Amino acid sequence: MSKKLFCTLLLTLLVGYSFASDLDSDEPTQKRETLHDTKTSFKDFRFSVGGGYARRLGKKDDMGDATLNKLLDKVQNQVFLEIDGQYFFKETWGIGLSVNNAFGSGDVQGQTFKTNLLYVGPTFSMRFDFDKFLLLGNIGFGPLFYGEDYQGIIADTFNKTTLGFQTNFGAEYKLNRNLGLGIKLGWISGSYNLEMNGGEDYRMNLSNFNIGTYLSFRTW
């Protein structure tokens, strides 16, 4: 799909050529009026809501206990929900806001372990618009809110906030003029320092890969 600059220049040339041609001929003005009515504003809004499967990334440590290791295995597989919106200043790019919440839980022999990862941040967004399909890409930085809750031999709750990075790519089919249904691949990255009992710092990985579907609404 052409860039806005190319579209604008091409449209300007076509309108100018049509106008000049009509001045020198007896052709009706219907063509010129049609060109004058062509949409030239690309300042559009888009919103979407969706969710799917998220997979925790990073090295999984051996906890030295079979039950704890099983709990960690279970919370590697998670569910995520995502809401995002964009405002496109140009035909192909704009800015937006993304909210992504991934959570998982495990229950083994009466012990439970739950984790929750919430990302909220602004994005730089790109779109490539076709007749029946829309391709989208987002990249951004923002705070990551991580929490975990363990209930077993002891009860322990932990919360941490750090800086996160998000990128995702989506492809959607236009159901009608305003609604779309699509699939999205995404990646969220973040980490924090965890001080161990021996005084050593350990880098805890919070990254995940996610894939899901979504329903979108657009104003163009």
Image (cartoon, rainbow, N blue to C red):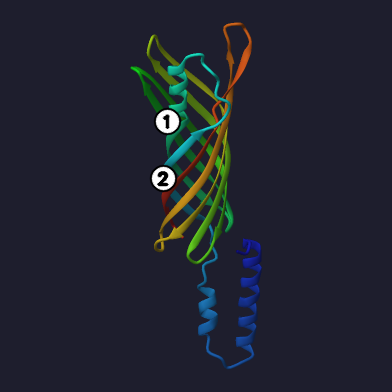
> Which residue does the image show at 65% across and 62% down from the upper left?
5
Sequence-first disc among 1 and 2: 2
Q: Amino acid at mark 2?
A: Gly
Using the image, tell me which numbered label, if any, was put on residue 50: 2
In the displayed image of the protein, which residue is found farthest to the bottom? 26
Q: Quadrant of the N terminus?
A: bottom right
> Which residue does the image show at 61% across and 92% down from the upper left?
25
Q: Nearer the viewer, residue 130 or 54?
A: 54
Classify 10 Å Cα crowding around label 2: few (below 14), some (14-19), many (20 and above): some
Q: Position of residue 212 (x, y in %)?
A: 45, 45
Q: Nearer the viewer, residue 64 or 121?
A: 64
Left or right, 209 with respect to 18, comes to left
For mark 1, give the secondary structure.
strand
Q: Is residue 121 above or below residue 69?
A: below
Q: Is residue 83 above or below residue 152?
A: below
Q: Nearer the viewer, residue 77 or 173?
A: 77
The reply to whether discs 1 and 2 touch (Cβ–Cβ < 8 Å) is no
Q: Amino acid at mark 1?
A: Phe
Left or right, 108 with respect to 162, comes to left
In the displayed image of the protein, which residue is found farthest to the top? 198
Using the image, tell me which numbered label, if any, was put on residue 103: 1
Q: Is residue 63 above or below residue 129?
A: above
Classify 10 Å Cα crowding around label 1: few (below 14), some (14-19), many (20 and above): many
> Which residue does the image show at 53% across and 89% down from the upper left?
28
Q: Position of residue 136 (x, y in %)?
A: 54, 52
Using the image, tell me which numbered label, if any, was put on residue 45: none
> Which residue does the image show at 52% across and 28% down from the upper left?
144
For mark 2, give the secondary structure.
strand
Among the 4 quarters of the image, the one containing residue 62: top right
